[in-house]
Amino acid sequence: MTRNEAATHLLVELWDAAGLSDVRAVEDALTRAARESGATVLHSYMHPFGAEQGVSGVVVLAESHIAIHTWPERGYAAVDVFMCGACDPYRAVAVLREALAPGRVEIAEHRRGVAG
């Protein structure tokens, strides 16, 4: 991140991933991802939609947030990793790869608050 931007926002798509209906595993992956990125976890909230169904959740950070929505029936998860300061959001992606074992990962990077 450069001085003329506020934050980095990664839109991460995980395909053929595992454990996407396990609310504890998803929460653990997100909180570990935040900490490994150098972020400070303030609060987390996960909502399971039922046995073998998806999870939606957010980990609120002092440096912004990580959010997830999962579709276990499709092996798919959409993840937002939004961080400012000295955090490295790409380290969060590495943790998610290890924890959820996706077959394919797609990342779109957006620089937020860029001063023209």
Image (cartoon, rainbow, N blue to C red):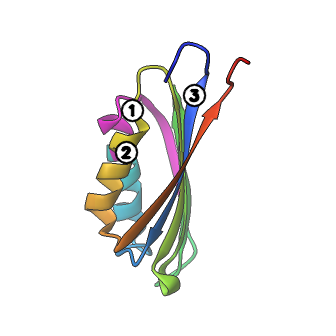
Query: Looking at the picture, which amino acid does disc 1 mark?
Result: Asp
Residue 78 shown in magenta: no
N-terminal of the pair, mark 1 or mark 3, is 3
Which range is magenta?
33-46
Q: Residue at x 65, y 31 (%)?
A: 112
Query: Looking at the picture, which amino acid does disc 2 mark?
Result: Ala
Q: Position of residue 19 (x, y in %)?
A: 36, 73
Q: Which residue is drawn at 48% across and 80% down?
A: 72
Quickly name the residue at label 3.
7
Quickly name the residue at label 2.
92
> Is 76 situated above or below 3?
below
Q: In this view, does 50 lie to the left or right of 20?
A: right
Q: Quadrant of the C terminus?
A: top right
Residue 47 in view (yes/no): no
Residue 35 shown in magenta: yes
> Distance of mark 3 from mark 2, alpha carbons?
15 Å
Between residues 98 and 1, which one lies in front from this camera angle? 1
Q: Where is residue 31 in the image (x, y as percent from the top left)?
A: 38, 45
Q: Position of residue 50 (x, y in %)?
A: 53, 79
> Distance of mark 1 from mark 3, alpha carbons?
10 Å
| Mark 2: secondary structure | helix
Would you identify the image quadrant in which residue 99 lies? bottom left
Query: Looking at the picture, which amino acid does disc 3 mark?
Result: Ala
Q: Is residue 18 left or right of residue 15?
A: left
